[in-house]
Amino acid sequence: MKYLEEFRDGEIAQRIAAEIRQITTRPWAIMEVCGGQTHSILRNGIDQLLPPEIELIHGPGCPVCVTPLEMIDKALAIAARPEVTFCSFGDMLRVPGTDRDLFRVKSEGGDVRVVYSPLDAVALARKHPEKQVVFFGIGFETTAPANAMAVHVARREGLRNFSMLVSHVLVPPAIDAIMRSPTNRVQAFLAAGHVCSVMGFWQYPPLATQHRVPIVITGFEPLDVLEGIRRTVRQLEAGDARVENAYERVVTFDGNAPAQALLEEVFAETDRAWRGIGVIPKSGWRLSDAYADYDAEHRFDVRDIRTVESPRCRAGEVLQGSIKPTECEAFGRECTPRAPLGATMVSSEGACAAYFNYGRVVQLERVVSA
Amino acid sequence: MSAVLPETTAPAVTPSFDAWTCPMPLRDYPTIVLGHGGGGQLSAELVEHLFLPALGGADPAALADSAVLTLPGSRIAYSTDSFVVRPLIFPGGSIGTLAVHGTVNDLAMSGATPIALSVGFILEEGLPMATLARIVHDLGAAAREAGVRIVTGDTKVVERGHGDGIYINTSGIGVVPPGREIGPTRVSVGDVILVSGTIGDHGMAIMSQREGLEFETTIQSDSAALHTLVGALLDAAPGTRALRDPTRGGVASSLNEIARASNIGLVVREEAVPVRPAVRAACELLGLDPFFVANEGKLLAIVPAAEATAALAAMHAHPLGRDAAIIGEAVDSHPGMLVGRTGIGARRVITMQIGEQLPRIC
């Protein structure tokens, strides 16, 4: 497979890792923003190649994990309605709401479907005019263009039975919020490559300058991640705080202009609650006023939702990088991928699930060598 | 239906469905109706005109309530499996071929030579007769090819909306030769893990059909009966410790089961595991891991290190084992766990998946 295998080469990986070990003189805390990077780091064991001075902090970039509980509960309420066909990305089905998840709604008779593209949901709406088809539009800037296109197409075709429950979140305001946090330990960021493929990286230089923090646009294959770390460490060791693009085969400074134009038309900035973190100003997108008719929150009355988060779940601290998943007392005990307390234990991009699935080898080694 | 079929295996035929027309009097019913499960005239016609000819025994006089079989030896392997796959027909097979291969392979993994199968159909009212005919002919052809007889069966029809077209259950019996002991508890440190070919083919063939994904090449299911491959393997490596066909849950689940049952650590070199480029690409696209994707014509074998070369050669010489590879070994650390060596030289624990694999969002 071209353009993947080349970026998984074990020898080159060892070489980059050796260089990182060589240039590292003191401890650094680096946050990989995107859940896809967390997944890759643990799936491939990239952290095992790094010197002990480098600490990787897992960022809030798992869209499933940060979708607020209130939004999940709204989704559950809408999906349970008899006239609704509720479409979602697969990950979302197992995310716990206050008292159940979408799998449970499905087993109780709700028409809940996994789709791979929001346009598949539009096609369902076209085919079933008797149903109200709702798509759960979540994610970062990466998934936003396809979601915007779905709403755009629905309006163009006058599909009155399609709507979207929108809970989009944005990376730059999250980086800003993390750097402003009084407990912040992050000294550099691996920025999310796929987000930047859409948005470019023109939004990042002011953040790097203002917070004096290196930001390196980084991809997802093992060599991409290692190269991102290498460039980050080089900046940290030199006292630099610049934006660098280590994912040049995909990302340009300006990004995807037609996609950005569509996003501008379909969405509007809004304050957004991040699950486990709280409200971050102007950190999300909602449907713009021109598309308000397609907003599922308006179409279905779901205002009186009462949410109760599990008191045992410390996902918020995990998402902000204040604790490792294994430091949570519920981790691996009452909270497992089979029975998750919080969303971070659900998606394979969620830090807790990634630790549970891939991370145990480290603990295992300790047991074996003891 | 219940049938004792003649002791001779019916001559193999290659059915073609392009020209298939429903024989009288079935053509009066283009779809299954409730009466086909009622035990009356319609049931009898279905058995006589479709099931018996397709499944290899055309002698209606052989019908009886149970099959009486004469078996060599006294060690009998006995297995059952139910089939609910959707779509019913997919590249490389159908629910009919799976119904034979699934149970034959379960028998083969205990070292048994499969002898006879039962088949139970649960049909949904409204199932097109042509679809049923295709599936039943597939089932008969797969059984003949595997050299296993279908000796008894049953049909029920449920109301429309109470089934998914067709469900099939098969049970099978096989004979285990004296002295043949295969099981995960026999695995010991130093043993070698082999896989008989590329992994993930069946699961991705189904997934690509179900999700309407189009790739440049069609991914074919690997559905196949593995007992002759097992025979060749056991001739070459008589010390073979454990065999598994990694169906649902894939290679990861089967190796985890072996690791747990033996309480021995297993290590797999991920790069050594053969995966077709199209399957790998489809998995990347959907956010799936081929280690967890189902196979229907592959086996995992754990053999003593001294027999590994012979085992691999025997697999390579068999049509179903051409892509066989040595993928790992049993080790004296992390007992009961499966560890993957990643391409960049690090390690990860490979756990069993929870329920179905969910596609990742991005």
Image (tube, coloured by chain):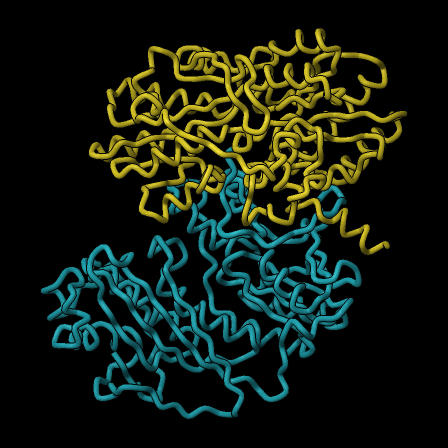
Chain colours: A yellow, B cyan
Of residues B218 and A99, which is closer to you in this image?
A: A99
The answer to whether one can see residue B195 in this image is yes
> What's the residue at 34%, 74% (across, down)?
B119
Image location of residue A133, percent across then percent down: 30, 32
> What's the residue at 55%, 15% (across, down)?
A199
Of residues A177 and A30, which is closer to you in this image?
A: A177
**Side (left or right) of A239 relative to B234:** right
Picture layout, residue A365 above or below residue A232 = below
- Quarter placement of the N terminus of chain B: bottom left
> What's the residue at 45%, 29% (across, down)?
A70
Picture layout, residue B146 above or below residue A311 = below
The answer to whether one can see residue A1 in this image is no
**Quarter-wise, where is residue B44 in the image?**
bottom left
Image location of residue B206, percent across then percent down: 42, 51
Image location of residue A267, percent across then percent down: 42, 14
> What's the residue at 65%, 68% (across, down)?
B261
Image location of residue B168, percent across then percent down: 34, 67
**Side (left or right) of B149 relative to A312:** left
**Side (left or right) of B272 relative to A64:** right
**Quarter-wise, where is residue A175 in the image?**
top right
Of residues A32 and B100, which is closer to you in this image?
A: A32
**Side (left or right) of B57 relative to B238:** left
